[in-house]
């Protein structure tokens, strides 16, 4: 028989996790902290982090909130940079957003082949909006 699974309650009881763990990681997330930083502050492994997300509803909700707070912080930083309120490097900020939050560049698709000729889609169906005759 193996040792029992560690839970948030058991970690708190053993003194391995502060009772105010939630407040601590939410405060860090409000400053743009990553999941890695949050795990380090909680002193838990990647495996335990993901298991608790799946098995501990309060932990899962808190992590989701942390992710949203983190993204908001970084988005605000970008907004401040565009207005001159904050200094920063736009390229670094863009790559940060792409890597952290799965942002992507928009892909424009044209219908021109490599030899310059037009490539027509197989079928085009145009649907006009319906108008009410009474108007």
Image (cartoon, rainbow, N blue to C red):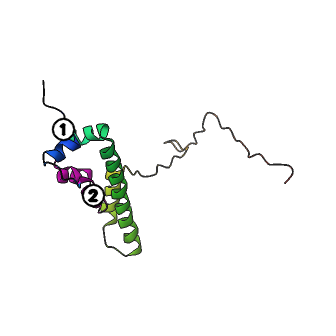
Q: Is residue 88 visible to us here?
A: yes
Residue 41 screen position, x and y as percent: 18, 54
**Residues drawn in magenta:** 21-47
SS class, disc 1: loop
Seen in the image, is 132 located left or right of residue 61?
Answer: right
Within-10-Å neighbours for mark 1: few <14, some 14–19, many 20+? few
Q: Is residue 88 magenta?
A: no
Residue 28 screen position, x and y as percent: 26, 60
Q: Does the magenta stretch include residue 30?
A: yes
Q: Mark 1 points at which residue?
A: 6
Seen in the image, is 10 located left or right of residue 22?
Answer: left
Q: Which residue: 38% across, 71% down?
A: 80
Q: Which label was assigned to residue 23?
A: 2
- Residue lying at the far bottom in this picture: please name it: 85
Q: Do the residues labelled 2 and 1 touch (CB within 8 Å)?
A: no
Q: In which quarter of the image is residue 74?
A: bottom left
Q: Which residue: 71% across, 42% down?
A: 127
Residue 8 screen position, x and y as percent: 22, 44
Q: Work out whether residue 69 or residue 113 is closer to the camera in this orientation and state it.
A: 69
């Amino acid at each position: 028989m193996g040792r029992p699974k560690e839970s948030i309650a058991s970690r708190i009881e053993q003194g391995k996790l502060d009772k105010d763990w939630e407040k601590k990681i939410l405060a860090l997330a409000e400053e743009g902290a990553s999941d890695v930083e949050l795990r380090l502050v909680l002193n838990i492994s990647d495996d335990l982090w993901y298991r608790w997300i799946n098995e501990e509803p309060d932990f899962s909700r808190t992590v989701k909130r942390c992710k949203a707070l983190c993204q908001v912080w970084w988005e605000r930083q970008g907004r401040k940079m565009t207005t001159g309120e904050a200094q920063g490097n736009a390229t670094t900020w863009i790559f940060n957003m792409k890597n952290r939050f799965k942002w992507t560049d928009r892909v424009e698709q044209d219908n021109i082949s490599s030899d310059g000729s037009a490539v027509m889609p197989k079928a085009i169906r145009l649907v006009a909006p319906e108008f009410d005759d009474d108007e």
